[in-house]
Structures are given as C-alpha cells and as structure tokens.
Image (spheres, rainbow, N blue to C red):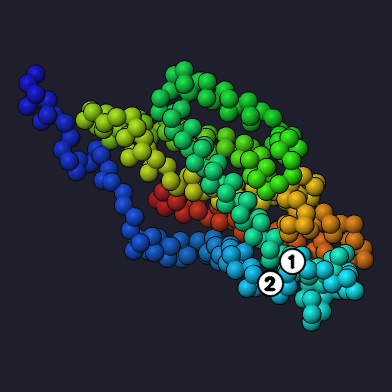
Amino acid sequence: MSSDVMRSSLPPAGSPFEPPPRRVNPAAWWAGLKRFVRSEPLGAVSLALITIIVLVAVFAPLVAPYDPLLQHRTRTTEGPSGDFLLGTDDLGRDVLSRLIYGARSSMIIGVLTTAISLVLGTIIGVVSGFLGKTKDLVIQRVMDAIQSVPPLVLLLFMAVVLTPSIEGTIIALVIVITPSFNRVARAETLRIREEPYIEAARATGASALRIMTRHVLPNMVAPLLTMSSLLFAGVIIAESALSFLGIGTPPPTPSWGLMLSEGVRYVEMAPWMVFAPGIVLSMAVFAFNLLGDSLRDFLDPRLHR
C-alpha cells in the first residue's frame, strides 16, 4: 500500500473520531455554574456555604475580633457576651477567633491534601490503566496493600511516626487518600482507552504520553471533581480526629479538632467550647458531602436523558 493511500485512510483533522482540544472558556464555565445553580439548588446552597468558609479562612486576620492566642486570664470559661460572642475557653482565649483561624488550618490541610492526592492518584491510575500488563499489576498491588490497612490505624501510625505537625498530618492523609483517586482514574482510563478516538490517535502515531495528556485526562475531569469534593470532607474529619487525639495539628495552633479535644474536659461548665467547633465542623462536612452528591448528579449525563 502506497504512503498516499495510507495517509488517505487516516482520520482528517477535525474528524468526529477525535475530540477537539479543550480550552478554558470563562463564558462556558459561568454558563455551567448558572445551570448548576438552577438544577441543583441544594448544591448551590452548599457551594455558597463553602465559599463563606473559604473567605473567612482567607481573611481571618480581618474577620477575627481577637488574636486566637491572646489569653484573657481574668475571663476564663466565660459564657457568650458582647465582648466574646461565643465565650472564652479555659485559658481565656476567644472561641470565635479560634474558630475562624481553625477554619484556615482545616482549609489549608484539606486543600493541600486533596490536591496532592489528586495529582498523585490520577497520574498513578492513568499510567497503570493505560500501560496495563505487568506495570498495572505491580502498581495496583501496592495500592491494594495500602487500602487493606484500616484508614484510622494507618493514619495513627503515620501521624506518630511523623510527629505531630501540619506537614506530618498532610503526608499521612495523602498516603491514605491517594489510592482512592487511583482507583477512579484507573477505572476511567480502562473505559476511555477503548473509545474510537483513542484508536484514531494511535493510528496517527500519537505517543502514549500525548494520548494520556490530550485525550484521557480531559475526559475524566467530572468523576475526579466529584471524588475530590467527597474526599475533602473526609480529610477534614480525619484531620479533626487526629487533632482530637493530640497527634494532628499541634497546639496552640487553632484547629477544630483540637478545640473539641480541649473543650471536652469542660463540657459541663463551658459547653460552648464543644458546641461551637462541633457545629461548625458538622456544617462544613455536610456542605462538602452535599456538594459532592450534587456534582455527581449534575455531571452524570445518564441522569439527564
């Protein structure tokens, strides 16, 4: 067969077998956001609540009425009042200010943990699913070994080994969360690599790296986005649990879990020390879980038929 004939048999540019390259379009994103708000009102409410939490965390120095470490020694375990809207703790620190700065700690740990786990898990899952064979077998057995250990046990072990710190907490959470992203990315890769446009890309001589970055990754954004929202809530809970046990965010750094751990000893004489961080933590986790469910429903085309 001549080279001219071979070239004529390949799909031309713009062929329906190969999707056009995706570009960031702000207008399309804004239109998609408006459709999301109309079709998923509960998701819109959760998104608004998450936005408020993020803004409060970012502008904590401007929003907080006091320094979270400032101790009012003569006003310890004081109930809510005009000076301290949510009362003070056992050291006379303003509970509201510590809640606001605690949001910053939780958001930083949540964002970094989810972002790092997303990148690592996606790369591992795509490479494993696309290359297959021995590489897939070895990689997945390592991931299975990590997931075979109960998450809480693995978190406790890693947190103790790494010593209590924000960096150690992030590393421990990344090790636990990464296999979940890997499983989603691998499953999507196994599905996408059988699509006609992947065969067309192979026929044109595209390298494996080009196919993975140009065709595979853009077509798994929706499930990874949903998984990120759901796992973000899990990260917040896990960080709070580690801080509650004293092996997460080290004191005196404000943290919702640490505030719960400190307040449980005074629950009878100063219940606001427990109720305030407990309610805020519950609302944040509920908002992220609700957003994840709404994104899954909104991005699943099978639900719009």
Q: Is residue 102 above or below residue 66?
A: above
Determine crowd level at label 2: few under 14, some 14-19, many 20+ residues with C-alpha closer than 10 A.
some
| Amino acid on which the number 1 mark rests in the picture | Pro
* Label 1 secondary element: loop
Q: Quadrant of residue 280?
A: bottom right
Point 37% across, 64% down: residue: 31
Residue that sits furthest to the right in the current view: 269
Residue that sits furthest to the bottom in the current view: 82
Nearest to the observer: residue 177 or residue 34 = 177
Q: Which residue is mark 1?
A: 68
Point 63% across, 29% down: residue: 146
Find residue 235 and name its label: none
Question: Does the residue at mark 1 contact the one at mark 2 (Cβ under 8 Å)?
Answer: yes
- The picture places residue 199, in percent across and down from the top left corner, at 28, 29
- The picture places residue 240, in percent across and down from the top left corner, at 73, 51
Q: Is residue 26 above or below residue 217?
A: below
Point 60% across, 68% down: residue: 59
Q: Which residue is mark 2?
A: 64
**In screen coordinates, is 169 left or right of 58?**
right
- Residue 62 seen anywhere in this rendered image of the structure: yes
